Image: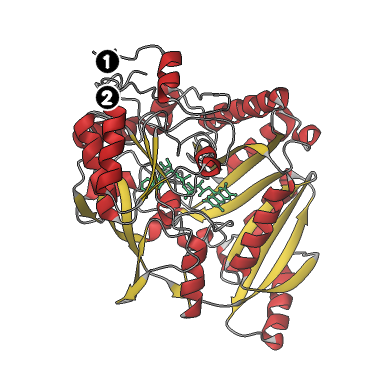
Amino acid sequence: MPQKVTSRRKFIKYLSFAGGSLAMGDMGALFTFKDEATPDLVAEMIKQQIKGQIVKDHLLVEEYQTDFGRVIRKEPRLIVVPQDDDDIITVFRIAEKYQVPVSLRGAGHTCYGQSLSDGGILIVNNSRLAESEATIKDGLVTVHSRTQWLALEKQLNGQGLTSPVLTDYLELTVGGTLSVGGYGLRSFQYGAQVDNIKELELILPSGEKTTCSPEKNTDLFRYSLCGLGQLGLISKVKFKPIPYQRYTSVFYVLCTSVKDFIKNIKTILHPDFIKEIDHFSSYWLNGTFIIEIGSSFIEENKAEEEKLKKKIGAQISFYKNSVVKDYHLYLHQIRGNWVERYGVSHHVWEDYIFGIDQLEEFLNRAISETKISQYQNILPALYIVACDTNQTRGIPFSPTYGNNNPMVYSVGFYYMVKYGNSSQLQTAKEHHQGFMKSCLELKGKPYLYGWHDLTENQKIQFYGEDYTKLKSLKKQHDPANIINPGVFVNPGKTAAQKI
Ligand SMILES: Cc1cc2nc3c(=O)[nH]c(=O)nc-3n(C[C@H](O)[C@H](O)[C@H](O)COP(=O)(O)OP(=O)(O)OC[C@H]3O[C@@H](n4cnc5c(N)ncnc54)[C@H](O)[C@@H]3O)c2cc1C
């Protein structure tokens, strides 16, 4: 008779994963199989029934044991790269039958282990193909969630189109960013990526495929977007692209204090000025804020650029102006190179979202409380983008949801800690705990892709009835808590897990 595996140590040994120390996260949903035969049986059934791959290459296995954050490590029992939706459905059905947890991963760019599996099956829904397979019909793009935004953008640009909102770094999957929000340079006009989704297809934990939109299966639509995969896997989405303007005239504004920064933002994002621009972002680097604003053109046009320079210069003092071709692709490159400069690091990243007055208070607090300029070796940058809340489409876990300000600001604190430096890692985590406390006091919201370390009580304080609603939808569609257990909703102990 096989023995039931009970202790965590035995369980991990039993999984027989080779090598490496195991630094588990606090939010793990430690999973125990019903008996010793089940894991092999499940693995064998999946291998036989899917067309996609089971990952064996040890470098890839290692990659999938952690996420971009490189703080939390978890070991999946089986890593599946599905070939198509039928493979995903097959895995979901087998998992449901044998009560084995399934975790979902796109490009794995979370920072708190949200895309890892603790001993269950990990589905890697990430196409590394340089070409996207999106289709365009009746003015709408239909794209699979595994597609990376970079490939999609190149395809759309080739047809004179672009996505309304793009993240700065683009090797992220459509499904991954839509499960958290998706903000960028054009969010001050178009909202988040989730606000632009007209329809989505969701594979429910039962394996059933369902179409959701603001009019159809509304709850599933509203709670699967920004839903961290709690209700199933978003397989396809539809959105309306916008015309592509290849050349961007970019203006750089320097601000030496929080006060100066806020004053400039107020001028730039004022209704009188805002129509002149279609790009807005800002940074805090080496103790100074830099605002980047831009206006795009289809063709290079010196006369138009000069006219724009005069208009902008009349209201804002900029220190530099340049014309950039394919700005989003350029930014992607810059962002990727910037991250690479820090080598193998723990990325303790999190963004917090506020209205303008709360942003000012938050920055004042953050900068003085932690004296962040003293920590520039581990906190090299803050990144701030704006989002028009009139575009917010009732997605309860979107960090802009419920904010009464017409424009909100996301400020990201990107700690880069040299791998293994546990005291600096502790400092970064403590700073974030302080920021989260301020975020709660100032009625802001955290961005859930990041290092958030939220307690159950904090989740209730931030999301109130929406958290209860998400829990009840999870209970309805995933009663045994099979899909992405431990990632966000804490439904208590279930048959399939021991927390
Ligand atoms: C370098 C870098 C730059 C970034 N820049 C920006 C930016 O400019 N703007 C911005 O808004 N964000 C930005 N982010 C945050 C980014 O949007 C999120 O980390 C996003 O989740 C990454 O997508 P991914 O494919 O890596 O998703 P993953 O990290 O793989 O997954 C994210 C979450 O969604 C779930 N999930 C994944 N795919 C699906 C699916 N198909 N259906 C249901 N659930 C799913 C996962 O289980 C996980 O919980 C950045 C992050 C990094 C590391």
Q: Amino acid at mark 1?
A: Pro
The residue that label 2 is drawn on is: 37
Instruction: Report if the beta carbon of the residue with label 2 is closer than 8 angstroms to ligand 1.
Output: no
The residue that label 1 is drawn on is: 2
Q: Can residue 448 be seen here? A: yes
Dot 1 lies on which element? loop
Q: What residue is drawn where x is 45% and y is 19%?
A: 13
* Left or right: 182 as drawn, with respect to 225: right
Q: Quadrant of residue 103?
A: top left
Q: Quadrant of the N terminus?
A: top left
Q: What residue is drawn where x is 50% and y is 40%?
A: 61
- Name the one closer to the observer, 376 or 187: 376
Q: Which mark is residue 355?
A: none
Q: What residue is drawn where x is 46% and y is 74%?
A: 156
Instruction: Report if the beta carbon of the residue with label 1 is closer than 8 angstroms to ligand 1.
Output: no
- Name the one closer to the observer, 168 or 312: 168
On screen, residue 7 above or below 404: above
Where residue 224 sits in the image (x, y, percent)? 32, 45
Q: Amino acid at mark 2?
A: Ala
On screen, residue 197 above or below 306: above
* Left or right: 167 as drawn, with respect to 252: left
Q: Are marks 2 and 1 in contact (CB under 8 Å)?
A: yes
Circle 2 residues within 10 Å: few <14, some 14–19, many ≥20? few
- Name the one closer to the observer, 498 or 441: 498
Circle 1 residues within 10 Å: few <14, some 14–19, many ≥20? few
